[in-house]
Amino acid sequence: MKKLMFSLGIIIIFAFYVLFSSQNSTTYTPPPQNISSNIGGSGNKTSTTSSSTNSASSSISSGAANPPPIVTQTPPATVASAYKDGTYDGSVDSAFYGNVQVAAVIQGGKITDVQFLQYPSDNEHSHEVSNFALPTLKQEVIQSQSANVDAVSGATATSQAFQQSLASALAQAKN
């Protein structure tokens, strides 16, 4: 019974606290802002607004007499192709479930294809990992034209071995 009375007393005290604190609280109301009263320094708000509008429109119309300078851009210099055309076999690199070796196919100085010469496929899990990771890595390489691509989540070791093998192939293809 003592605990019940104590709890009831706490609740009543809390209720009074909430009631009195809400009556005594002040709500912040930001002062009204009249932007036009600060423009031009004139005491007449209407004339200030219209004069600033007129001066703004006159500066716009006078800007037509002095058009902004024309900026011309020179086309970028032709970049020499990064790689020699051909097919280059990369090194054999070890992944957790097996070896990875790729061949980079270069046409027109660009990576156009990545062929998989070896990849982990000895068991069902490594075969599944290779089937979802390698096409993603291949696509990333063709888009970025580099061996520096993000690893595929869940296939980190395979991704790293892929990157190393491809980097060695691209090193052979450098001009």
Image: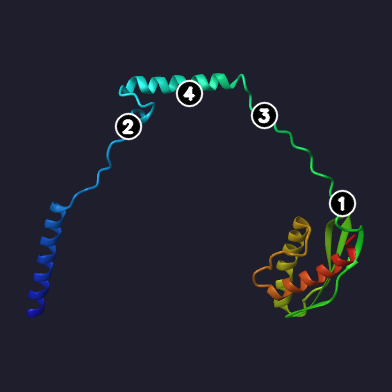
Q: Residue at x 89, y 66 (%)?
A: 172
Please provide percent x and percent y for residue 126. Answer: 72, 76
Residue holding disc 4:
56
Q: Residue at x 73, y 33 (%)?
A: 72
Task: Mark 3 or mark 1: name the one nearer the start of the chain.
Answer: 3
Q: Quadrant of residue 98?
A: bottom right
Distance of label 3 from label 1 (alpha carbons): 33 Å
Residue holding disc 3:
69
Whether residue 15 sits left or right of residue 158 in the image: it is left
Q: Looking at the image, is mark 4 or mark 1 nearer the viewer? A: 4
Of helix, strand and loop, which one carries label 2? loop
Of helix, strand and loop, which one carries label 1? loop
Of helix, strand and loop, which one carries label 3? loop
Q: Looking at the image, is mark 1 or mark 2 nearer the viewer? A: 2
Check the image and report above or below for 161 versus 58. Answer: below
Please tell me how crowded label 3 is: few (under 14), some (14-19), or many (20+) other residues with Cα within 10 Å.
few
Q: Are marks 3 and 1 in contact (CB under 8 Å)?
A: no
Residue 156 seen in the current view: yes
